[in-house]
Image: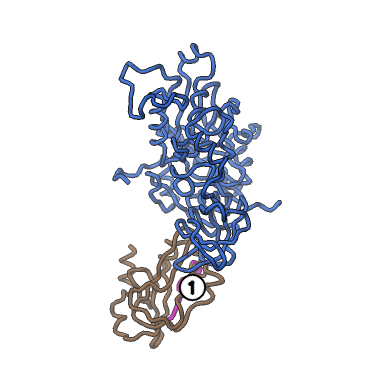
Chain colours: A brown, B blue
Amino acid sequence: MNVPDDLLYTDTHEWIKREGDNVRVGITDHAQSELTDVVYVELPKMDRQANAKEAIAVIESVKAASDIYAPVKGRVVEVNKALEADAGLINREPYGQGWIFVLKIENPDDLKNLKDAAAYKTQIG
Amino acid sequence: MSEIAPKKTPLYEEHVRLGAKIVPFAGWLMPVQYTSIMEEHQAVRDNVGMFDISHMGQLVVAATPSSQKVGGEAAAATWLNTMLTNNIDKLDIGMGQYTFLLNERGGIIDDLIVYRTDEDTFLLVVNAARTEEDFAWLQSHLKAGRSPDRPSGGLPASAKPTAGGETAAPCTLANRSAEFGGVAIQGPRVVELFHALFGRDTEPPARNHIVDFPFDGTAVSVARTGYTGEDGVEVFFRATDAVKLWNAALEKGKTFGIKPCGLGARDTLRLEMCYPLNGSDLSPQRNPIEAGLGFFVDLTKPRFIGRDVLSRAKENGTKEKLVPFRMKEKGPPPRPHYAVFSGGCQSERIGEVTSGTISPSLNWGVGMAYVSSAHAKIGTEIDIEIRGQKFPATIEKKPLYKKSAS
């Protein structure tokens, strides 16, 4: 499974890319491979405030719906509208065109609670 | 559910070797998918796919030698006709039919296929989750010698004949599920694969027929039936021959684009055809009339368990009906247990979704729901509530997916 070294991770299989005061969030290669066949993404509302570990998006595969969580406290400043037309981007490019939302974070120290690539690799075995 | 460890089919190791995702289902460890539900679904629609159906149950009902001698007529057929809704008498040797096993209230214990494998011998292929219950139900009726034409006030349901003191049963009942494995091979290229497996000059059985064929030093039963809407066969064999047949089919099927397929694709394929799934669309609280499956109920038969209830249901109509629906907009997939509302401004709750998914063939949300009969007409606009939000849908005609002529 692809686990890029330059990203941070959650226990719930989101990846986090720091972009200044913002973080870009998606789901990991491992997560998309477990879900398979993503058919629908319910994106968070713009400007929504979210606490860490709050469910703010839903990914639906053929079989089931799964919640996606805000990795840290922040405000939604961007959502990936391309997923509305092609949810399969999450399967094909989980770390690229398949990103889900961008949060403006309140406190960069919150990122210290996240896992690095090595820790996430250990988690997924 | 009990804490009994799930059972493994004789093909379990093959599924693991092929990298399948394994899930517990109906007391069995079953492959839900190997690569992708979409790909497996498409393989069946375009080429051919193979499913492990070894978890399904096989019950055999046969006349006892004495009953044949004394009765002179088909004792097993006569008795089974009081247990099942469809008419056994329509079956020639080697033919099968879809039918229901009902409780006294007309509720569905199981939906199954019954084959007449000999003059007075029948094979019942039943749902995995219901095998034990079906067997116990049939056994209790067989032992008690009860049939629905007994005057009421006869034997109470709990009365069991004492050992040695029972009236001669008209036939024997055996649960042979553990002895058998099975695969469903489904898709437009199934006949080509059949020839590759059983010989160029061997013809597959006709639709709804079952025939035994020699295969690599053993014998297998092939039934021309399925649960996908495509041409297909279900092959039953001794559990010890399972791996041999599975691997031969995968090997010879390569030319035809075969894929091993899991329960995920089985569910999307059957739902596109509006074939009901027991436990979701059918239950002991639902009868075949409200499920829209009256075609498989022969009310001209003088008696069978549940007949009175079904006869009234047919005459007076039912409170609710099972209907297929299609979402009006591209959106989230409908799922079981989502609430259904009448469309328009005076929206009231009219029912519940029992099956739903994104149809891989249509790339669109579809499902089936029980709705109040007043709102069950084809073309009726309804709303499906998904995470607190209402999404419009339309009640459709069966099936939800129709193959365009190729």
Residue at the image point whose x is 41% and y is 37% from the top: B131
Q: Is residue B211 visible?
A: no
Report if residue B42 lies within the magenta region.
no
- The one nearer the camera, B287 or B37, is B287
Question: Tag 1's secondary structure?
Answer: loop
In this view, the residue farthest toward the bottom is A20
Image mark count: 1
Report if residue A92 lies within the magenta region.
yes
**Amino acid type at image mark 1:** Gly
Residue at the image point whose x is 63% and y is 46% from the top: B188
Q: Is residue B336 above or below residue B211?
A: below
Q: Is residue B320 above or below residue A101?
A: above
Q: Is residue B69 above or below residue B193?
A: above
Quarter location, residue B297: top right
Q: Quick one: label 1, few (<14), some, or many (20+) residues within 10 Å?
A: many
Q: Where's residue B253, x and y in %?
A: 57, 45
Q: Where's residue B129, x and y in %?
A: 41, 42
- The one nearer the camera, B43 or B148, is B148
Quarter location, residue A2: bottom left
Chain part drawn in magenta: A91-102
- The one nearer the camera, B29 or B270, is B270
Position of A115 with respect to B25 (left or right) is: left
Position of B291 with respect to B104 (left or right) is: right
Chain letter belonging to callout 1 = A
In this view, the residue farthest toward the right is B405
Quarter location, residue B157: top left
Predominant SS of the magenta segment: loop
Instruction: Please give the residue where the numbered disc 1 appears in the rendered image.
Output: A98
Q: Where's residue B271, x and y in %?
A: 54, 51
Q: Is residue A13 visible?
A: yes
Q: Where's residue A42, x and y in %?
A: 47, 71
